[in-house]
Image (cartoon, rainbow, N blue to C red):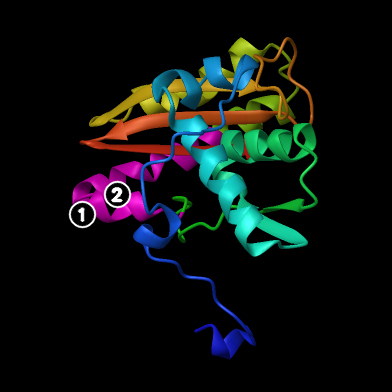
Amino acid sequence: MLEAEGVDLAFVPAEGEMWPSPPEVRLRVGGSPAERLEGMHRPGHLDGVVTVVAKLLHLVGPSRAYFGQKDAQQLAVIRRMVDDLAFPNQIVACPTVREPDGLAVSSRNAYLSAPERQRAAVLYRALQAGRAAFLAGRRDPAAVEAAARALLEGQPGVEPDYVALVDAVSFEPAKQAEPGQVLAIAARVGRTRLIDNVIL
C-alpha cells in the first residue's frame, strides 16, 4: 500500500523500541482540555497522547504531521503542545473519513456486532441534526446540543456520554453557537464507546 502511494520510508517501531522501559518523565495536559469531555471521561488519556506524540515528533522530525479531525480534542491538545513547547512541526488536520452511512472510520468499529454497527450510524445523524439546527438560525448552544441529543436518546442501545458544543481551541463550552465551533459526541453502543464531531 505504501509503495503504491510513492512512500519512500516507513517508521514502524515495535513497542519495545519506543518504550524499552516505562517512562519516568511524562508530559501533562493542564487547563480546560484536561477537565472537559475526553479529559474528564478518560483521566490521563490526553497526557499519554501528548507524551507519545512528542516522542514520535522528536524521533521522526517531520516538517508536517497529519491528524484526523475525528479526534478533535486530541488534535487541539497536540496543536497546543507544539505551540507551547516550540516544536518545529506543522500540525495538519485531515477531514474525518466516513463509511457510506456516515459512521466515522475507527478501529473501535471492529468491536461492534452487526446490529450495533447499524445503530452506531445514529451518531453522525445526530451531529447532522445539531448542525442543521445551527444552520436554521439557532444560536443557543443548548438548542444545538438538544437537537443532536434527541436522536441519540431516541435510539435503543445507544447511551450518550456527552453532547457538547465547544470552542475548537480551548474546548470551553460555547456561550453562543458560531461558525468554527466543534459539536462533539461520545456514546456507548453496546459495550463500545465511540466519539465523533462536526465543525459548525
Amino acid type shown at disc 2: Gln
Label 2, secondary structure: give it.
Answer: helix
Of residue 142 and residue 72, the one placed in the foreground of this image is: 72
Q: Would you call the spot at circle 1 few (<14 residues within 10 Å), some (14-19), or many (20 or more)?
A: few
Find residue 115 and report its horizontal and vertical position in percent: 20, 48
Pointers 2 and 1 in contact (C-beta within 8 Å): yes
Find residue 158 and report its horizontal and vertical position in percent: 29, 30
Amino acid type shown at disc 1: Ala
Q: Is residue 10 visible?
A: yes
Stretch in magenta? 105-127
Of residue 83 and residue 121, the one placed in the foreground of this image is: 83
**Image quarter (top left, top right, bottom left or bottom right) of the C terminus:** top right
Per the rendering, the mark at residue 114 is: 1
Q: Would you call the spot at circle 2 few (<14 residues within 10 Å), some (14-19), or many (20 or more)?
A: few
- Figure label count: 2
Q: Is residue 5 magenta?
A: no
Identify whether 173 is placed above or below 124: above
Q: Which residue is mark 2?
A: 118
Label 1, secondary structure: give it.
Answer: helix
